[in-house]
Amino acid sequence: MTRPINVAVLGATGSIGRQTLDVIDRNPGRFKLFGLTEGARSTNREAEYLVQGHAGEPDFDATVEAMVTDPRCDLVVVAIPGARALAPTMAALRAGKEVALATKEVLVMAGELVMRLAGEKGIRPVDSEHSAIWQCLWGEERENVRRLIITASGGPFWSQPNLDLDQVTVEQALNHPRWSMGPKVTVDSATLMNKGLELIEAHHLFGLPLAAISVCVHPQSVVHSLVEFVDGSLKAQLGRPDMRLPIAVALAYPDRLPDAVPPTTIQELSGLEFYDLDEKRFPSVRLAREAATTGGGHPAVLNAANEEAVNAFLAGEIPFSGIVWAVERALSDFSGCKGTLEEILEADRWARAYVRQMDGIRPVG
Ligand code: MG
């Protein structure tokens, strides 16, 4: 009998982290919790490495590096929110580990550098849309792929065209109609910036040009994304909106875990709808496409400005519509850079400082 796979979970107290622990707990013969990082709460787990605190703190970063590069560690699940996941992801990849990535910001900021480090084996996506695309691509030749179609639930405001986005409260923005997720990604879903970030993430993960990746609104969140092939065939992956499925797929690849989630019934497949994205009302995907096309530090600016603006919104400092407005301002005022790791980190710092000094961010007109 082969030994269980030693899994390190970075961000074990967040939404993805807790669901990852659940998948590990329910498959004790297959997986062993090798290490974890905890935020404010305790998970009451035992492991070879247990790190408390937050990324960016010196002790935390050193111990995490030791955990993800430990020769006994097989697989690293990266679920620390935001840009702080970049350093441990790169450390794990440099050490040749399998990486299951939930934090899309890592690829948005430094997709080229990270994918180069990952090499042939690539990265296992945990984001549900990218897991869907990944599963559709298993066994397929890359030159036969014509287009990727990322589905978006649309978030809580898409279906309310007359709602004044200046008046949206934090509670309304956190009330996602389909998925249960952490606050940052839930607000990103409401602004549709989540899809902008996912567009860039897909571009790096699967090596397709940005022009070959589109976004559509699918309110039921049953079809998690689609792939179009050169012969006109369309493949999709379907299932309930339950993150334990993409987590199970990433952990068990190339195997599948029995009963990872309850099966989808035929009744749940009736009445599936798909719509074009209204990019005028929700310009985030266009901004992300432009930032990724420019490349260099622009995607990092998009990401960092968004993170800061979302925090300001959650703190009640700016209106909901100020989030995307701040990102657009930051992108247009950024002078640009090439895209070494140092330059990307500098672009990240610049965008954070830029948004923080924008007093009372508010769109004009
Ligand atoms: Mg997603």
Image (cartoon, rainbow, N blue to C red):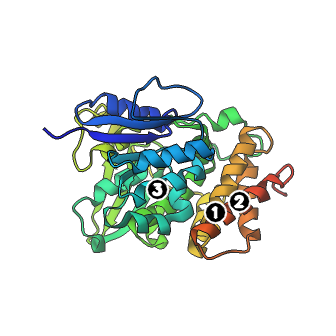
- Residue 169 rendering spot, x and y as whole percentages: 73, 36
- Residue 237 rendering spot, x and y as whole percentages: 32, 50
- Residue 29 rendering spot, x and y as whole percentages: 22, 32
40 left or right, relative to 225: right
Residue assigned mark 1? 345
Q: CA distance from mark 2 to mark 1?
A: 6 Å
Would residue 230 be seen by someone viewing this image from the given angle? Answer: no
Q: Are marks 2 and 1 in contact (CB under 8 Å)?
A: yes
Residue assigned mark 3? 91
Q: Is residue 333 above or below residue 167?
A: below
Kindly state the secondary structure of the residue where label 1 is placed: helix
Label 3 or label 2, whichever comes before in sequence order: 3
What residue is at 71 percent from the left and 66 percent from the top?
A: 331
Dot 3 amino acid type:
Ala
Label 3 or label 1, whichever comes before in sequence order: 3
User: Would you call the spot at circle 2 few (<14 residues within 10 Å), some (14-19), or many (20 or more)?
Assistant: some
Dot 2 amino acid type:
Arg
Kindly state the secondary structure of the residue where label 3 is placed: helix
- Residue 134 rendering spot, x and y as whole percentages: 33, 56
